Image: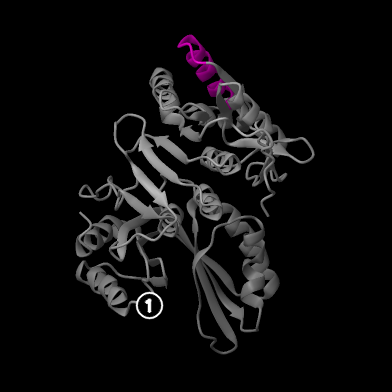
Amino acid sequence: MTRASDSTTAPPKPVRVLKFGGTSMSVLDRVADQVAEECRGGHGLVVVVSAAAGDTDRLLAEAAALGEDGAALDLLLATGEQNSVARLVLALVKRGIPAAGMTGAGAGIVTDGNAGRARILGVDARRVNKALADGRVVVVAGFQGMSEDGAVTTLGRGGSDTTAVALAAALGAEECCIYTDVAGVYSADPRVEPAARRIDRVHCEEMLELAGLGSKILAIEAVDYAAAHEVPLRVRSTFEPDAGTLVQHTPLEGAPPVVGIASSAAEAELAVIGLPARPGLAAKLIAPLAAAGVAIDALVQNEARQGKSDVSFTVPHKDLERARSLLAAEAGRLGAERLIEDASVAKVSVIGRGLRSNAKLLAKVLDTLDEAQVTVRVLVANETRISAIISESVLQTAVQALHKAFDLA
């Protein structure tokens, strides 16, 4: 549950929150110039920064050589963003712009105590509001916060996006702008489909699906937070003068039913064979994975035969080792016969509105993949997405065929 923020000292003018990712922070002068340009707009500015590209990976490698401790690792990783804060504050002051730097804890980001994957519980915005009232640009370290017992925590990959959205919600910001190395949200991954186009506007529910199904432009936790708090969210390029993509919360009038194709090659399929066909066993089977935060998708339980059934689902590659270990232990305890895995699967998804209730769209997806000679292993659908589990070797073929079939170029 998200705790109400304490924003006692309201800022004297409208606020915008800007977030700059790791690639952007690798060109510090460009970011400082962009912030200086934004200062001319008459807004109070809060700037959330990531560690410069490569810094977090370097710190992870250093930690791996030293040992394992979740709390200590969070302390170490948090220094990457703090380095970015200090450098940007110095660059802004050099340009004559008053600036205040804050860690996540200093900015009032309160989290649970889950090391490495903490969730934001609330934001105490008083200190940020005080600095804004003093006429300063506030530069905040993304990706981090402080637990209720005072421990430094990190939010996981993409956590700086969530920091920015949470601050925007707490401050009642007019907009939260995520600056990155791409010009916005595209109708497909341009590396897979060169004909992909930038989308001007997308509904938050569609963006949630895009973020969760392979698009790496926004962290799904950030989109979820923005949707819950109705934070206007925009994705723009640090390197191109473009309006980017607006993620909005009101319906898009006249929008086509399909807005984009999401894809992910980093998928693995796990199947538990010969699970006793008793009510509730499938739920018990996946409970340890859910408790560990493993993302499960495309779950299918086959009809029981001779008192046995099979359960299969997909997990991201990054969670495969942990999922395999947890699942093997639970499957054995529940009396399943064996566990099999296939790390060479992929997922292609059609994203839009009203998809599951539109039989013609479902048929079009299947017909398109069939004509492209792409075998569908599993098909799952809801109102905002139709996802097919396929072989990784035909992922590009599938994406390009669907992109063309729905006239998204």
The residue closer to the viewer here, 24 or 100, is 100
Q: Quadrant of the C terminus?
A: bottom left
Q: In the image, 197: left or right of 306?
A: left
Residue marked by disc 1: 357
Residue 329, image quadrant: bottom right
Residue 69 lies in the magenta-colored region: no
**Residue 354 image point, x, y percent:** 37, 71
Q: Identify whether 126 is placed above or below 265.
A: above
Asked if 385 appears above or below 69 in the picture, the reply is below
Q: Position of residue 75 (x, y in %)?
A: 68, 30
Point 51% across, 29% down: residue: 44
Quadrant hosting residue 105: top right
Q: Amino acid at mark 1?
A: Ser
Q: Residue at x 55, y 19 (%)?
A: 99
Question: Which residue ends up furthest to the right in the rendered image?
Answer: 149
Q: Which residues are magenta?
A: 81-97
Q: Residues within 10 Å of mark 1 (few under 14, many from 20)?
A: few
Q: Nearer the viewer, residue 230 or 163?
A: 230
Q: Residue furthest front?
A: 12
Residue 149 appearing in the image:
yes
Q: Position of residue 200 (x, y in %)?
A: 30, 48
Question: Does the stretch in magenta take in 85?
Answer: yes
278 left or right of 187? Answer: right
Indicate the quadrant where residue 38 lies: top left
Secondary structure under the numbered disc 1 in the rendered image: loop
Q: Main secondary structure of the magenta part?
A: helix
| Residue 66 showing in the rendered view | no
